Amino acid sequence: MSARPISHCLRARSLFRQSQNVQGFSTRSSLRGGTGHGDHYDPPTGWLFGIKPGQKYVKEGWETMWYYGFIGSLLAAGVAYVFKPDTSIQTWALEEARRRLEAEGILEDPDKVKK
């Protein structure tokens, strides 16, 4: 007779257990997300972004700072990308091969001035 693994026993026990909360659809406000802070839903007004035609949009205080910060960080990342050092294995191998060929005399040194 083979022994049953412990996982089978635990799985069988969990099938016989009754859940503590037998209400399927609760009407309690804490389960429905009601926290007493009022309605967070803005009904649709029919206007794009809620601004009526002819009305000027008033920027909020954080918007200008966010735009400058976002564009500035993009520019800084672009400059860093352009000036990053070339660390690829292909560049290293090409330079190493050139140095070895120059040392063996097969390739002439391009920096050497001919007289």
Image (cartoon, rainbow, N blue to C red):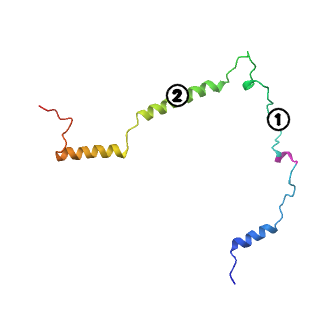
Which span of residues is magenta-colored?
27-31
* Residue for point 22% across, 47% down: 100
Residue 40 left/right relative to 77: right
Q: Are marks 2 and 1 in contact (CB under 8 Å)?
A: no
Tell me: residue 45, above or below residue 110.
Answer: above
Q: In the rendered view of the protein, which quadrant contains the C terminus? A: top left
Based on the displayed image, in which of its 4 quarters is residue 84 positioned? top left
Q: Is residue 89 above or below residue 4?
A: above
Residue closest to the eye, 8 or 65: 8
Q: How many marks?
A: 2
Q: Residue tagged by mark 1?
A: 39
Label located before the other in sequence (2 or 1): 1
Q: Amino acid at mark 2?
A: Gly
Q: Is residue 84 left or right of residue 7?
A: left
**Type of the residue with mark 1:** Asp
Name the spot of residue 53 as percent of width and height, x first: 74, 17
Q: Which residue is mark 2?
A: 72
Tell me residue 54's x, y (percent).
73, 15
The residue depicted at 79 percent of the width and 29 percent of the height is 44
Near-viewer residue (59 or 12): 12
Q: Residue at x 85, y 45 (%)?
A: 29
